[in-house]
Amino acid sequence: MKKIALILVLFLLFPSISNAKNCRKGIPCGNSCISASKTCRIGTYSEVPTSKPKKSKSTPTSEQVAISKQNFDNAKTQLTKLYKSNPAQTEFYCGCEFSFNNKKGIVDFSKCGYKPRKNLNRASRIEWEHVMPAENFGRHLQCWRDGGRKACKKDVSFNQMEGDMHNLQPAIGEVNGDRSNYRYSQFTNQFNQYGQCQSAVDFKARKFQPREEIRGVIARTYLYMSNKYNINLSDSEHKLMMAWNKTYPPENWECERNQHIAKIQGNDNKFITEQCNEKSLN
């Protein structure tokens, strides 16, 4: 009887003995704290979760989403849609009409008097011209110094600038190629390199003279790129752009195009917006 009573007392004092089989080596259980070399014989245990709770991510803004998707390929796709919706608009340097066959832009020489200088195949197609050349904004980045445009393809800042639609215009491929990264300038009154096209290139001096109708567009594009991406312009370049900006105010299409791009890309060109707003008030 005494033995049975002793067992009953132990059971009442230590009810968790039956759970000892759940204990593991090195795991605290009950009020005891044991080393990894010993086995817990009293009470139960609960394992502490080893994984940290996931932090909730903040939802990106529409502007952040737009920037993350901003690159040259996406810009060309969006601009092709824009110009398909506005078929009356002409290409940039020579004012020639063009149309699209899927994504391929085709130039109509017959209505603008364009004559290819030496490259008929490239002259026949539309290319997306960077008004401010890629070298102008790329050379500010380390990737460009490391390996030029190819090395910058994985750089987020470069992709954003290269894909900025405010800096892209549809141009005859041959003229786009001839312009290269030459600076805009005024140097001639003779235009005979591309038939009736009123733009000219000086290959020796590395200068390009755009037709008068687009000089204001070029100026506001340069001022925009300089302001938005902190790109330095030379004194002579800045003076020329300021003069063209004042002399050649925006026409209706420039104002409309600016608004369309703002809806797609998430930001306007303030140098266009300011003058277009003043124009609408007058």
Image: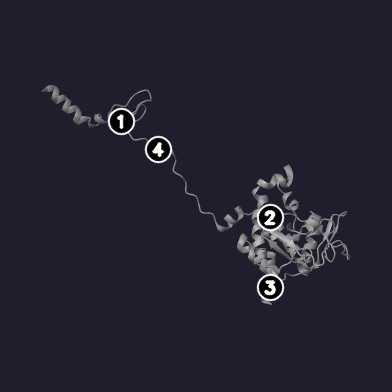
Label 1 secondary element: helix
Tag 4 or tag 3, which sits nearer the N-term? 4
Q: Residue at x 66, y 51 (%)?
A: 159
Q: Quadrant of residue 26?
A: top left
- CA gap between label 1 and label 4 equals 17 Å
Query: Amino acid type of disc 1?
Result: Asn
- CA gap between label 3 and label 1 equals 81 Å
Tag 3 or tag 2, which sits nearer the N-term? 2
Of labels 1 and 4, the one closer to you: 1
Tag 1 or tag 2, which sits nearer the N-term? 1
Image: 44 above or below 173: above
Label 3 secondary element: helix
Disc on res. 22: 1
Residue 266: give x, y in percent of width and height: 61, 60
Query: Amino acid type of disc 4?
Result: Pro
- CA gap between label 2 and label 1 equals 64 Å
